[in-house]
Amino acid sequence: MLTGVWTDLADLVLPAECAGCRGSGLPLRQGACPACAATLQALRPIPVRPTPAPSGLPDCVALGAYRGALREALLSYKERGRHGLARPLGVLLAEVVATAVGDRRPVLLVPVPATARAARTRHGDHLRRLSRHTAARLRGAGWPVVVAHPLRALPRPDSATLDSAGRARVAATAFRLRTGRLPAVRRSAAGRAVVVLDDIVTTGVTLAAVARQLETAGIPVYAAALLAATARRERG
């Protein structure tokens, strides 16, 4: 395990609103007030799995449930322009990777790619940013880590507007292999635990689609590491 997930990092110059509770006029550390920082620090990664799980879904580990301070911090990062949160959230995600892999050994991280539209809206690929900080944290703790981007995301509807069946249909054709990168990625994957990174898991269809694409290319996935897991909500 890694240590000092949140409190050992230097303060950032960030907006006065806490990323975890949205309270104002509070002392902040890495964008969170002391209470929210303590809540995030106390989270411990656990295995999660949607029910029912889609075919091809790898073993999944998440930092916590998609609620409270963790939910608000993710929304602040993804939807409210708090890009400085990439560092502390990436550090938290490193804890999840360490738990998912277990013994310290070489790892290949594959973040789920954002669509071009999402990247424009959020001024960059939010998981690509997170993966850089995750890798840096793991390397600092002695893990041999490589980050690879063998997939690109095709245009698709916002998953928040879809029910579980719609998500499954969209996910099946949501990603395409970057064939020119595959030989290098296969070499990097040799002898490493391949871990797919995502921020939130709901139905698991996106992670399953990514894993199938990678395994078709000869890159077997060991596990998926997530910041949060949310309960499924079927639309009537």
Image (cartoon, grey):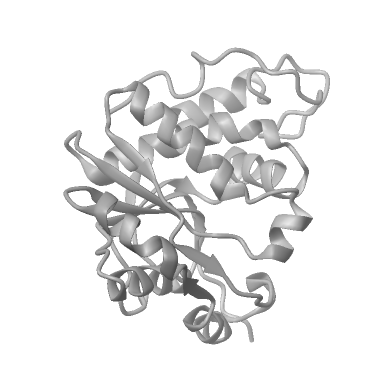
In the displayed structure image, the side of residue 73 where residue 121 appears, left or right: right
Q: Would you identify the image quadrant in which residue 95 lies? A: top left
Query: What's the residue at 50%, 33% (across, down)?
Result: 133
Q: Which residue is found at the position 43% from the left and 29% from the top? A: 136
**Nearest to the observer: residue 190 or residue 95:** 190
Q: Number of callouts in the render?
A: 0
Residue depicted at x 41% and y 27%: 137
x and y percentages locating residue 120 in the rendered image: 76, 56
Q: Nearer the viewer, residue 165 or 120?
A: 120
Q: Is residue 127 above or below residue 57?
A: above
Residue 211: quadrant of the picture: bottom left
- Residue 44 visible in this rendered orientation of the protein: no
- Depth check: 12 or 39 in front? 12
The answer to whether residue 107 shows anywhere in this view is yes
For this view, does 194 lie left or right of residue 131? Answer: left
Q: Quadrant of the N terminus?
A: top left
Q: What quarter of the picture does the C terminus occupy?
A: bottom right
- The image shows residue 53 at horizontal and vertical percentages of 35, 74
Please tell me which residue is depicted at 57% across the width and 30% down the height of the picture: 87
Q: Is residue 57 above or below residue 150?
A: below
Give 50 or 159, whichever is nearer the viewer.
159
Work out whether 51 lies above or below 168: above
Query: x, y percentage for residue 100?
Result: 28, 46
Q: Is residue 12 left or right of residue 131?
A: right
